[in-house]
Image: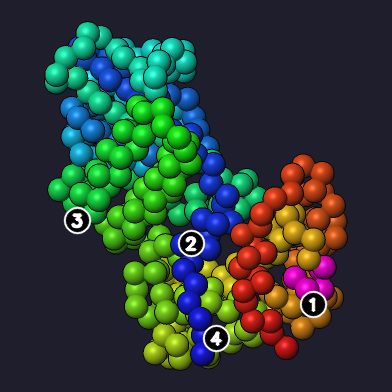
Amino acid sequence: MLGFRDPVADAIGLLRPRTVIGPSLRAAGEWALRFDRFLHVRIGGLVRGTCWLILEGHDPVLLQEGDTFMLGDPPPYVLASAPDATPRPAEPVLAGAEDGFVRIGPESEGDLYLCVGHIEFDDQNAALLTDLLPPLVIVRAADPHGGPLAQLIDLLATEVGVAAAGGPLVQNHLAQILLVHMLRAHAGQTDRPTGWLGALNEDSIGAALRAVHADVAHPWSLKELAEISHMSRSAFAQAFKRHVGVPPLEYLIQWRMSLARDALARDTLPISEIARATGYRSESAFSTAFRRVVGSSPAQFRTQARRSTTRGWSPAGQILQGTAVGA
């Protein structure tokens, strides 16, 4: 019987998120800050007040108290008190933060209170998520997901303003929880295909995805995955590609190679063991598939990756070591 693995947790583990929160912004009067392009995700929310978010190529959006936003690989953007306010660079303003806050204008009871953070991912696997995200996701306070998100923003803002023991650790975990809730909200509020993220909301396709992640080494066939989804092979293949963007077995190969890349870069597992753990009967078969997807042999990739990466704990190693090895 298959175990259970959550594709979202697996993907975020491979992304190795690094979070930087704040400083929080408190502002009154007329103001506008221009933020430079940023990789990979920026998340923020309004604890109090309203402001405009102006993203290049999009209409200005009014954010209100309790609203949360997420920017995926965002181009330069502006946060402002009004759409026509003249922006100034945000970086020197934020550099003047004291006790986790930046203030613009006189202090007042009705001033804006905005908490913003950014999340960077491991470059070699960042596309697992960033390719699925639109430039802008907004979750309104009245949205079904809005309440929990507003609470998380409140908690995050509180942690930024308090110099308590373990503060950075708490901030990092809260930001990752916030990211997961934003991904859930995004998957639930759009009708268009959103890759594996949106497919998880589909009972049939989601079941196949969870099965693949539960046992990546299993020699999955189209017939077997279709049966898990209670669909014919042709209907399953069409539905999977429509939702995820690639055919089922191509998704399986891409996920196996994502795990393999991470394990090769971070672990001391022999290549033969990585091959078996990712569903290949022989090291040569694994090497052929790896070269086709990545463009180099596993040994070459490991050598190049270790020149630029400091070894540490590997999510892929944990995932692979917990996976039944195929024959």
Task: Say which of 175 and 183 sits in front.
Answer: 175
Decide: few, some or many residues near mark 1? Use Cα within 10 Å; few <14, some 14-19, many ≥20.
Answer: few
* Amino acid type assigned to the residue bearing label 1 in the image: Ala
Look at the numbered discs 1 and 3 and tell me whether their residues touch, using CB distance below 8 Å.
no
Asked if marks 1 and 4 touch (Cβ < 8 Å), the reply is: no
Label 3: few (<14), some (14–19) or many (≥20) C-alpha neighbours in 10 Å: few
Residue, disc 4: 222
Percent across and percent down for residue 132 are 45, 54
Instruction: Looking at the image, tell me whether mark 1 or mark 3 is earlier in sequence order.
Output: 3
Disc 1 from disc 2: Cα separation = 28 Å
Residue with the most extreme front position: 165
For label 2, the residue is: 9
Question: Residue 144 shows which numbered tag?
Answer: 3
Q: Is residue 118 visible?
A: no
Using the image, tell me which numbered label, if any, was put on residue 60.
Answer: none
Amino acid carrying label 2: it is Ala
Residue 115 vertical position relative to residue 120 in the rendered view, above or below: above
